[in-house]
Image (cartoon, rainbow, N blue to C red):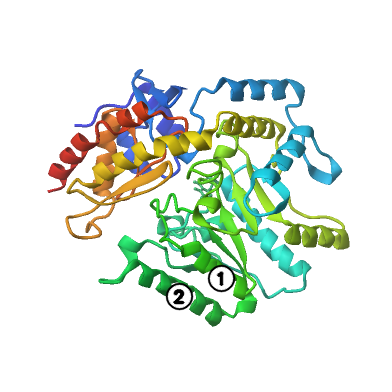
Amino acid sequence: MTKPLSNMQQRDVEAVLHPYTDAMKLRTTGAHMITRAEGVRVFDDRGRGYIEGMAGLWCSGLGFSDRELIEAAKEQLDKLPYYHLFGGRSHEPGMELAEKIKEIAPGNMARVIFQSSGSEANDTQIKLAWYYNNAIGRPQKKKIISRMKAYHGVTIASASLTGLPPNHRDFDLPIDRILHTASPHYWKEASDGESEAEFLARLVKELEDMIEREGPDTIAAFIAEPVMGAGGVIVPPEGYFPAIQAVLDRHDILMIDDEVITGFGRTGNWFGAQTMGMQPTSVSMAKQLTGSYVPLSAVAMNRDMAEAIEENSGRIGTFGHGFTYGGHPLGCAVGLKALEIYERRNIVGHVRDVTPTFHRLLREAGQHPLVGEARMCGLMGCIEVAPEGRKGFEKPGAVGTRLMEELVARGSIFRSLGDVLAVCPPMIISEAELEELFAPMHEALDVTYNWAR
Ligand code: PLP
């Protein structure tokens, strides 16, 4: 028997269409109403507290009650609550944040353009790649190579980059000029007996073959998350990005680095590109850019691209792109404060300090017979549930969802991505809080294991 919905839950299901939700199921279960938050914890309408092991959506790196971020927002609202960067106007927080991003971004970045979301950043990346190639007289060089299991957003173009079936199904996506090469997930994708080095060599060859088949003159860019997030926390094999980079360099293909999750300390360096040895020509950032207190995203691009784009705007008379809220002063002020905090409190150092505990806890969970693989990089990780000795359940998702529910019922928020249980806590989490987050794991695994048999 399901419990009747509370008044709030009833109002909610009758008013909100929820993203990434089975709306029919929600009609009977109701949504979990979150009312307030403190540090790494959130509280629901019944007053129950939970450790937020996903930092919301991989995004609240500084937790949920940072006074400095809140004060920075208030000050900016008092001073200049809105202005834009269109048509020759600017404002100080926008200018300063762009300067700061240039200083810390991987590669040698020369210009920054702002949006509000990660999807808009990656949409902008596609447009920049197209505009750039038109500007330098290569109008055929337009296709973008993404990867299966990638997550780059949900606008029409960024959802096309995303390599996950539910983002395409019944949305008539992907659009043309977007290609997907293999995901670099050794445990799942390698053939029987294939070593990790052989797997990597095969991935590189598949990419090279795709480029040759399509024609190198038609390929503008390759886009990648340093560590795939929503596709299942997939950490590529050692040497993956340098090997890919060599192929891209040979064919004059841009490397777009999607740091929407991995940026600002998550992997134990300022950017995932540094952890993974990537050499981006442009970088997408969002989420932890403002600790997610205010929506803001940015694309940083190298000098070659920036100059070609600026010169083309001179020829046309304008650069015809930009969002009303791109570079909102509130987001920029909070972003500046977040970057200051990351530096002053040495958040990268803290991530490195607590990472061994986090990885130990994931490996311990990985020993359970319900777990096929535990994966991790810095403070992002997952366990993937699987039938013993095999790589996937016949009915994908049910066991992962059940495990997530068992954990949430015990006060620990993890997120099931099908049968992958992801964990990506606020970067400020302490070792004791990590232990608390994982404390119900074995019991939840046992209960789920018995349920699944
Ligand atoms: N890129 C990556 C790597 C992401 O993880 C996400 C969101 O999770 C996006 C892009 C899209 O960002 P948004 O949801 O802000 O549009």
Residue found at the far top of this picture = 47
Q: Nearer the viewer, residue 303 or 27?
A: 303
Query: Which is nearer the eye, 427 or 82?
Result: 427
Q: Quadrant of residue 416?
A: top left
Q: Is residue 400 left or right of residue 55?
A: left
Q: What label does residue 282 carry, if any?
A: none
102 and 189: which one is in front?
Answer: 102
At which x and y percent is residue 194? Answer: 30, 71
Dot 1: what SS? helix
Tell me the element at label 2: helix
Residue at x-position 84% and y-position 61%:
311
- Amino acid type of the residue that numbered disc 2 sits on in the rendered structure: Glu
- For marks 2 and 1, give the one nearer the viewer: 1
Q: Where is residue 239 in the image (x, y as percent from the top left)?
A: 46, 63
> On the rendered structure, is 354 left or right of 218?
left
Q: From this viewpoint, is residue 173 visible?
A: no
Q: Mark 2 points at which residue?
A: 206
